[in-house]
Image (cartoon, grey):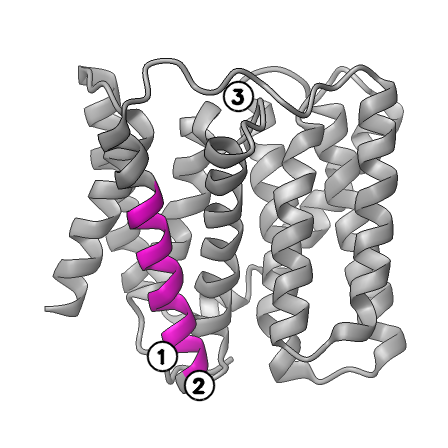
Amino acid sequence: MKKICIYILAATLLYGFFRELSVVKVLLMIASLASIFAIDRIPVKYITGMKYPVILLSFAATACFFFYPRALTGYPVEIIVTFLAFYGLTFYMASMEEKKNDFFKEVTAISILFVTASFNLFVTGKPLFILPLAVATILMLFVLERSQIIPFIAGYALIAMIIAYRQGAHFIGTGLLGLNDINRYILLGASFIFLIAGFTGFMKKRTFTTILPFFGFLYIATDILMVLGLRLPTGLLYQPVILLAIVSPLVGVMLKPGGERL
């Protein structure tokens, strides 16, 4: 019953993002739900085993940007780069409770991952994606009782926003066109229900399978709130395909038993 409710909620959230359905959008939704089912069937040890490959690929994308700045720009490569930027940081955050590294190692690792993700998002033309990611990271660090690291992330985010502003980025837009009140309530309601469900699982037991979806939906809810409330001119609401790439693994992991450990 729990899994059925999660599938229905996931379909509702995806519908809210796509708003006006077409054959292509319906096929994308079906593909996303199918990937959720597939991820649910993969053992946790194989998912956690992707941590270092994803992080290394994110670093590799950064290296490519330095030597071939135009190699990884444009569709669909930007989807892959954004996915790696998000999950490189997310995988590490999800394993912090298990590893229990000292402060210096944690602040160094998170700093490198956050700066790398920010750089990759800058090069792909999505600097404002950094803002909700930074807010979600700060909130997650507070919940994980890692408040000493928060000033570092806040500082990196502030520097990134100053650079974005100097490059002509607009922080306030006109809002999404064609978004009625029903779609707005669906997006806010579904994302925050997922967030509450993730937080509930996190409070029961802090494992990889509870921290990862909680942090992920914390980011998604923050992104939606900034786009709808603050009228941020870019975000997941403007990039539905990137949304599918990010949401599907989160829901797939959420379907797993909360007690599974690394």
* Upstream in sequence: badge 3 or badge 2: 3
Question: Which numbered disc, 1 or 3, marks the residue closer to the eye?
Answer: 1
Q: Which residue is mark 1?
A: 258
Q: How far is the residue under mark 3 from the one under mark 2? A: 37 Å
Q: Secondary structure at mark 2?
A: loop
Q: How far is the residue under mark 1 from the one under mark 3? A: 34 Å
Q: How far is the residue under mark 1 from the one under mark 2? A: 7 Å
- Which residue is at 35% across, 44% downward? 188
| Residue 257 is covered by the magenta coloring | no
| Residue 191 is covered by the magenta coloring | yes
**Residues packed near mark 1 inside 10 Å, few (<14), some (14 to 19) or many (20 plus):** some
Residue type at the position of mark 3: Pro
Q: Which residue is mark 3?
A: 76
Above-or-below relation of 120 to 44: above
Q: Quadrant for residue 145, please give it.
A: bottom right
Classify residue 130 as left or right of residue 241: right
Per the rendered image, the range of residues in magenta is: 188-203
Q: Is mark 1 in CB contact (under 8 Å) with mark 2?
A: yes
Q: Quadrant for residue 146, please give it.
A: bottom right
* Upstream in sequence: badge 1 or badge 3: 3
Q: Is mark 3 in CB contact (under 8 Å) with mark 2?
A: no
Residue type at the position of mark 1: Gly
Q: Which residue is mark 2?
A: 205
